[in-house]
Image (cartoon, rainbow, N blue to C red):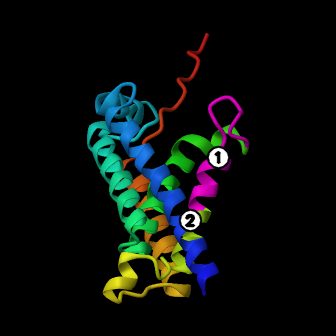
Amino acid sequence: MIEIDLAAALLRATLGITMLAHGWNHAFGGGKLPGTARWFESIGIRPGRVHALFATLAELGAGALLLLGLLNALAAAAVVGTMTVALIANHIRNGFFIFRPGEGYEYVLMIIIAACALGALGPGRWSADHLIGFTLDGLPGLAVAALLGGGGGLALLAACWRPNRPKADPAP
């Protein structure tokens, strides 16, 4: 159906461009990779330099794969993984709305849900996956995106996230 192919292409393009922009900003915006590394360290993800590099590569790689429609479910999993880390390590404590101080989680949650939906929908016929005859959609595509991506993000947090604890007031 042309409508499904159009929906998949629009979703892939939107997520792909968004992830490319995220990765590009980590690499070349503001403080570049060293600034991204310092920011990761500041929210407790250590070592910051390693995670800044891998997050940047994951975002750039996932964005490119989504635009091509290549390895769609795995690219969606990379999006889910990076945004799960962002959701838990930085955004969830700030409430739902993005305009709240510290930025709430509505934006990253929507990206996670859109990536899961794309895993379930599949890349459509206008994709490299279709050209090479690779099909992973429906519940298997959703499982790869949600479970592999979410599980990977949670594993990274369990292994490498050590949020800074507020210092206790000294006894009088």
Q: Residue furthest top?
A: 172
Q: Residue furthest front?
A: 2
Residue 39 sits in quarter = top left
> Is label 1 or label 2 in front?
2
Q: Which mark is residue 13?
A: none
Q: Can you identify the residue that label 2 sits on? A: 11
Which of pointers 1 and 2 lies earlier in the amino acid sequence? 2
Task: Name the element at disc 2.
Answer: helix
**In the image, residue 54 lies in the stretch drawn in magenta:** no
Amino acid type, label 2: Leu
Q: Badge 1: how crowded within 10 Å, few (<14), some, or many (20+)? A: many
- Inter-mark Cα distance, 1 to 2: 20 Å
Q: How far across and how far down the image is residue 74, in percent? A: 39, 72
Q: Nearer the viewer, residue 23 or 85?
A: 23
Q: How far across and how far down the image is residue 106, in percent? A: 68, 49
Q: Which mark is residue 105?
A: 1
> Which residue occupies 36% across, 73% down?
70
Q: As displayed, is residue 100 above or below residue 19?
A: above
Task: Name the element at disc 1.
Answer: loop
**In the image, residue 101 lies in the stretch drawn in magenta:** yes
Q: Which quadrant, please, contains the C terminus?
A: top right
Q: As displayed, is residue 156 above or below residue 48?
A: below
Q: Which residues fall within the magenta stretch? A: 97-112
Amino acid type, label 1: Tyr
Q: Nearer the viewer, residue 41 or 128?
A: 128
Q: Which quadrant, please, contains the N terminus?
A: bottom right
> Which residue occupies 51% across, 53% down?
83
> Which residue occupies 46% across, 67% down?
76
Residue 52 sits in quarter = top left
> Which residue occupies 59% across, 15% down?
171
Q: Badge 2: how crowded within 10 Å, few (<14), some, or many (20+)? A: many
Q: How far across and how far down the image is residue 47, in percent? A: 29, 40
